[in-house]
Image: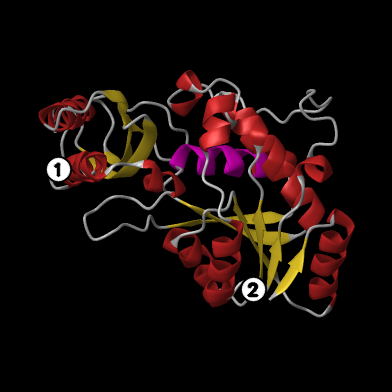
């Protein structure tokens, strides 16, 4: 496995791979790698890509300094995991390389309006501007590629797809299924911050999603069931919403077809998100 940190070398590496007729697959991460990241690498290899994985804890997408400071950093374990997953080139740029003026703001910010404004965007102002800005930079350095993201961060995936579409970037965004532990908890780098009892409580998110996925219903009924399920497990949701899977606009009782249920809760001080498909039945059907 090759290892790079210099942006110019990273750019040249990707260019050389394309010059050899190979499609570049990009797996952006913030480290603390787990099997969810491994599934993205495997998906890239299944597409026949040479896989570049980036590790960069992007400070511009954190809501506060405490959250940034507590984010898990495991560089030695990440190197071993990346090698085990089959990453061809692991890229770990420095903060000064990515944001030379940090902590001063950059003159340029990428903002994807509308889809960024609700759900995670409400409680974490500026979060998606930070995400879109850093991902745009990753794409600019890497050049034409396929980019792989997990569906666990479903709103983030929508933001990135909208950015790529609006800016006509030469990037194919590939969404990959959520990977779960046997108890149903969606894999996340933040899960290591949960206590044993907190982890047990956190499984209520996947149970609530399984409940609404089992039976078609109106959007309002799905929302009520999500809330009831979470409250019965003593969890107070930050949000429990049913939305259009493309626009993330909240679904109404006149909508039918496939929608997406999105949840967020705080457990042990850790913000957890999860989501899954639901079937809508329009009122009167």
Residue at 61 percent across and 77 percent down: it is 48
Residue 115 seen in this snapshot: no
Where does the image place residue 53, in percent across and percent down from the top left?
64, 62
Q: Is residue 146 visible?
A: yes
Observer-nearest of 260 and 273 = 273
User: How was this image coloured?
Assistant: secondary structure
Query: Marks 2 and 1, how far apart in space?
Result: 37 Å
Nearer the observer, 107 or 234: 234
| Above or below for 65 versus 158 | above
Side of 134 relative to 195 (left or right): right
Q: How many marks?
A: 2
Circle 1 residues within 10 Å: few <14, some 14–19, many ≥20: some
* Residue count near mark 2 (Cα–Cα under 10 Å), binned few <14, some 14–19, many ≥20: many
* Residue that numbered label 2 is attached to: 49
Task: List x then y, in percent, for residue 95.
Answer: 76, 42
Q: Quadrant of the C terminus?
A: top left
Location of residue 27 with respect to 216 vertically, above or below:
below
Let me know if residue 159 is in the magenta part: yes
Quarter of the image that includes the N terminus: bottom right
- The disc at residue 211 is 1
Using residue 144 as the reference point, say whether residue 152 is left or right of it: left
Q: Taken as a whole, is the magenta stretch helix, strand or loop?
A: helix
Magenta span of residues: 154-164
Does 258 appear above or below 126?
Answer: below
């Amino acid at each position: 496995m090759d290892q790079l940190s210099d942006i110019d070398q990273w750019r040249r590496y990707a260019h050389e791979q394309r010059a050899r007729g190979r499609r570049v697959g990009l797996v952006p991460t913030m480290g603390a790698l787990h099997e969810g990241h491994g599934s993205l690498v495997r998906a890239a290899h299944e597409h026949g890509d040479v896989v570049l994985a980036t590790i960069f804890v992007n400070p511009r997408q954190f809501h506060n300094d405490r959250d940034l400071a507590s984010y898990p950093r495991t560089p030695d374990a990440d190197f071993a995991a990346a090698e085990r997953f089959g990453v061809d080139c692991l890229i770990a740029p420095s903060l000064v390389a990515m944001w030379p003026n940090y902590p001063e703001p950059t003159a340029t910010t990428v903002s994807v309006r509308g889809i960024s404004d609700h759900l995670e965007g409400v409680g974490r102002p500026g979060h998606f501007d930070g995400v879109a800005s850093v991902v745009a930079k990753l794409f600019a350095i890497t050049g034409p590629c396929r980019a792989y993201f997990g569906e666990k961060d479903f709103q983030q995936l929508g933001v990135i797809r909208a950015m790529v579409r609006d800016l006509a970037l030469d990037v194919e965004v590939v969404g990959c299924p959520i990977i779960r532990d046997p108890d149903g908890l969606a894999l996340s780098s933040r899960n290591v911050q949960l206590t044993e009892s907190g982890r047990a409580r956190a499984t209520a998110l996947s149970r609530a999603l399984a409940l609404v996925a089992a039976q078609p219903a109106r959007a309002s009924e799905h929302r009520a069931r999500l809330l009831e399920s979470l409250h019965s497990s003593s969890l107070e949701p930050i949000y429990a919403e049913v939305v259009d899977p493309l626009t993330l606009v909240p679904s109404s009782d006149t909508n039918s077809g496939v929608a997406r249920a999105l949840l967020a809760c705080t457990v042990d001080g850790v913000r957890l998100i999860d989501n899954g498909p639901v079937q809508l039945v329009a009122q009167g059907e």
